[in-house]
Image (cartoon, rainbow, N blue to C red):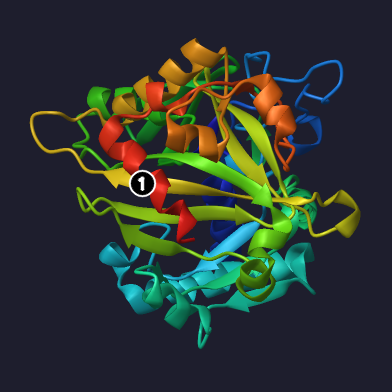
């Protein structure tokens, strides 16, 4: 079948590409190919009772399907050029912000109305952070919550489904250049299009490397972020999250000067498993509905690493660390902060004795056996936070 535009990936990039194409030219014939399930069939088997940890589904419903890896996320949309990508380097800072605000309006019109927009502008925490050698980055944050984010995606799909041909459970095997455009091959056949947009996200990064190599598309080694997800009683960070909700705080480690930042803060949220290319990692979710909230807040602490020639496989480096964690813990490892500082492996009895109960069922262990020594030093500054 022939199309004007073929889109590979039904995450945010693919969804909004299809939406914008139809806004500009409704007569276009558009197809979207997605390796995962439709939104209403994206169900993770982990229920906390019969199934307590990741069982390695062939197609992870948390990571793929309509809505992408962010479908069940905290539903935070950051409006800033200070973090979250480098789009502004290609189109300019003003245009990048204009596009972010445009997307925000679309989200509101598809079910996100009434949600709160937080801002760091004029916040007293800027001064407080500087006093502790920390730096609070500027941003406006729209918080939809996991529940409202799902509703927005439902409404977007309802709008698109009779205007776009969706092919779900259809991982694209290859993309070929043909006369008049491109041909994509998947388990449901071969399809051609005059134009092709690829937006496969993290889950498709390995596949994308292969496509770029086959089509002679030059690539660059990007940075890799290494870190941990920290969980603590929600009351500890309430003064921060009540005012800002999402705060990106940056500092440099004393010995090596590595740049560390907080990321993806989930007030009264939960830590969840993710399966990316067979590697079990974690993410955080948080709900707008008070009935679904927990007593804990979680956030990530990340340190970025940029590699120079001749090394080019930054993703492979990050994956090797995650695989080591999976090998030692049979999945995700959890460790008490005090045990990590003392160089002591956490045990289930010590986890049970803590004043906080982890929201994710994980294996007690020793993170120092997983994270390289230089990178592990970033966790120690947590006390200043």
For residue 333, what is the image quadrant?
top right
Write the residue at 48% across / 11% down.
327
Q: Is residue 321 left or right of residue 146?
A: left
Q: How many labels does the image show?
A: 1
The percent coordinates of residue 7 (x first, y second) are: 51, 40
State the residue in front, 148 or 344: 344
Q: In this view, does 184 lie to the left or right of 91?
A: right
Q: In this view, does 89 lie to the left or right of 352?
A: left
State the residue in front, 188 or 318: 318
For residue 315, what is the image quadrant?
top left
Secondary element type, mark 1? helix
Write the residue at 47% across / 63% down.
248
Question: Mark 1 sits on what residue?
Answer: 378
Q: Can residue 86 be seen in this view?
A: no
* Residue placed furthest toward the bottom: 122
The percent coordinates of residue 25 (x first, y second) are: 56, 61
* Residue placed furthest toward the right: 291
Write the residue at 48% across / 39% down.
228
The percent coordinates of residue 290 (x first, y second) are: 87, 58
The percent coordinates of residue 24 (x first, y second) are: 54, 65
Q: Is residue 309 visible?
A: yes
């Amino acid at each position: 079948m022939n199309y004007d535009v073929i889109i590979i990936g039904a995450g945010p990039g693919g969804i909004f590409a299809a939406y914008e194409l139809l806004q500009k030219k409704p007569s276009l014939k558009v197809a979207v190919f997605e390796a995962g399930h439709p939104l209403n069939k994206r169900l993770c088997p982990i229920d906390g009772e019969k199934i307590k940890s990741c069982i390695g589904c062939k197609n992870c419903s948390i990571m793929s399907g309509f809505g992408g890896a962010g479908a069940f996320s905290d539903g935070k949309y950051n409006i800033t050029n200070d973090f979250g990508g480098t789009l502004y380097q290609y189109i300019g800072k003003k245009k990048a912000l204009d596009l972010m605000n445009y997307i925000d309006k679309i989200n509101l019109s598809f079910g996100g109305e009434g949600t709160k927009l937080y801002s760091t502008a004029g916040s007293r925490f800027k001064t407080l952070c500087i006093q502790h050698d920390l730096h609070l980055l500027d941003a406006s944050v729209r918080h939809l919550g996991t529940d409202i984010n799902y509703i927005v995606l439902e409404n977007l799909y309802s709008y698109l489904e009779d205007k776009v041909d969706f092919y779900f459970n259809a991982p694209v095997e290859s993309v070929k250049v043909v006369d008049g455009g491109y041909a994509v091959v998947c388990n449901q056949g071969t399809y051609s299009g005059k134009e092709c947009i690829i937006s496969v996200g993290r889950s498709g990064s390995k596949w994308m490397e292969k496509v770029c190599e086959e089509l002679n598309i030059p690539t660059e080694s990007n940075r890799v972020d290494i870190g941990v997800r920290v969980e603590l009683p929600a009351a500890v960070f309430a003064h921060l999250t009540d005012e800002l909700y999402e705060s990106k705080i940056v500092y440099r480690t004393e010995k090596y000067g590595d740049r560390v930042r907080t990321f993806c803060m989930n007030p009264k949220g939960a830590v969840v498993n993710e399966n990316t290319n067979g590697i079990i990692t974690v993410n955080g979710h948080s709900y707008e509905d008070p009935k679904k909230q927990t007593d804990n807040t979680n956030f990530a602490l990340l340190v970025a690493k940029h590699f120079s020639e001749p090394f080019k496989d930054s993703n492979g480096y990050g994956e090797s660390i995650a695989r080591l964690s999976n090998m030692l813990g049979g999945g995700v490892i959890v460790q008490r902060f005090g045990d990590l500082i003392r160089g002591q492996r956490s045990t289930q009895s010590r986890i049970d004795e803590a004043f906080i109960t982890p929201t994710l069922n994980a294996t007690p262990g020793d993170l120092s056996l997983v994270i390289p020594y230089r990178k592990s030093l970033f966790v120690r500054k947590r006390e200043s936070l």
